[in-house]
Image (tube, rainbow, N blue to C red):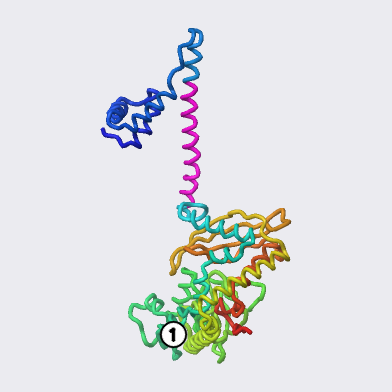
Amino acid sequence: MKLECGIARDLLPLYVDGLCSEDSRAALEQHLQECAGCQACYQRMRAESAEPAPVPPEGEASTRFRRGMRRVRRRWALSLVAVLVAVPLIFMTVAQVRGDGLCFTNLIPVAKCYHFLSLLQDGDYEAAYDLLDTEEIWENLTVYDSDRLDELETYQAVTIDGELWMFAPDALQEYFDEIPEVLEGDEALAFWEAVYQNSQTEASPFLIPAAAYETLEEQGRLNTLEDTEVWDEEASYSGSILVEDSQGNAYYMGYADSLIVMSDELDAGDYLIYDYDCVPELIWEAMIESLEDEQAAFEAQAEPYLDMGYDAWRAASREQFAASMEQWTEENGGISRFRFSNAYAGSGEGGSWWQLEFDLWFTGDSASDGGITLLADGGLTFGGGSVRTQGGKADLFLEAFSAALYFEVCSEALYYGAGETDAAGD
């Protein structure tokens, strides 16, 4: 058996102590004859562990005892090192499998977060900003996410009891082997029953014409939900409610588990129905129009950014971030310390990432009243945070941090693509 030098040197301590097996000893001795480097290493070990000069007979037992204890200490030290290495590896392996906690694949993101928070703690805000994924922020500010609009434009039409309904393609395939153009009478009623029952098994929302719903209810074919028609602002219904569109057409809408709506009138562009697989044509057209208006508003608000260009926007944002955070720290006190709290793995169409959570302490704090959440998928992105005390230091810090991230021509509403804004700036 031919040994590599690394293996040979691992065996040398055992060889010097006379603890090798016969096969290992023979292989090692052959290697020592051929390798001058390992031979020199062996001679050094042998000299270090050589027996002392002869002692009077009464000292021989003590010498053997010391030699034995030296071997015990060496083995004990090696065993302790092995345990110290193995225990963290076990915990990290468990965390890797579960997808939360400190594990092998998030060591670098966690280290990057520690560096980022250390820079914030030291007040080096420009260097901290440089660690953020500003390209993702720029894209969110300048590129409209048209996925929902694109999806709605693929909806297909089916006439049900004289009313045109628009269906997501995968929903039609779920309910029909062959997609019909028209459904009437009993066939239409059976279809609405299937829509309702599907909401019970898959926790999907439903929207059903009031007349069809009430007929099914009278016939005892809707017996798995406790229905209610009264909106209670304090309640969450496990059932369905009666709503009307802008032309007075009545529908029942709901979820299998819970339903919270803010009005008993269903606006044509109401976001509550965005995830419904089928909607009346009137509402579908209004949803298209609403999203097109939103896209137009977004693009108008993004124009100042595009005129600036990425480099100028980033430089301005970096300067503003540092100035804002310096002012906040001067008024409220900075981060005094932080501690890793937890990590969670996430994935989506854009890939995978880690959600990393850290508890924060501020100047004068004896306890943490909240923390920051950072998302890492190569770069770092601010993901919000947790607050235990409303109006506390952590709450104020997170609010100030979020506001400081975006150059002043941007408003928070623009970033999240919702509502009207005055993002054109001064």
Q: Position of residue 94 (x, y in %)?
A: 47, 49
Question: In the rendered image, is residue 218 in sight?
Answer: no
Mark 1 lies on a secondary structure that is strand
Task: Give the vertical position of 421 relative to 65 (above or below).
Answer: below
Residue on which the image places disc 1: 166
Q: What's drawn in magenta, residue-wise?
A: 68-95
**How many numbered discs?**
1
From the viewer's side, name the closer residue of 47 and 296.
47
The residue depicted at 66 percent of the width and 76 percent of the height is: 232
The residue depicted at 31 percent of the width and 37 percent of the height is: 4
Residue farthest to the top, as pictured: 57
Question: In the rendered image, is residue 120 in sight?
Answer: yes
Task: Give the vertical position of 98 relative to 70 (above or below).
Answer: below
Q: Residues within 10 Å of mark 1 (few under 14, many from 20)?
A: many
On screen, residue 330 versus residue 70, left or right, reads right
Identify the amino acid type marked 1.
Met
The residue depicted at 37 percent of the width and 33 percent of the height is: 9
Q: Most prominent secondary structure in the magenta stretch?
A: helix
Q: Position of residue 172 (x, y in %)?
A: 39, 79
Q: Is residue 75 magenta?
A: yes
Quarter of the image with the C terminus in it: bottom right
Q: Is residue 242 magenta?
A: no
Quadrant in which residue 25 is drawn: top left
Q: Position of residue 138 (x, y in %)?
A: 51, 75
Quarter of the image with the N terminus in it: top left
From the viewer's side, name the closer residue of 341 and 30.
30
Q: Position of residue 189 (x, y in %)?
A: 44, 82
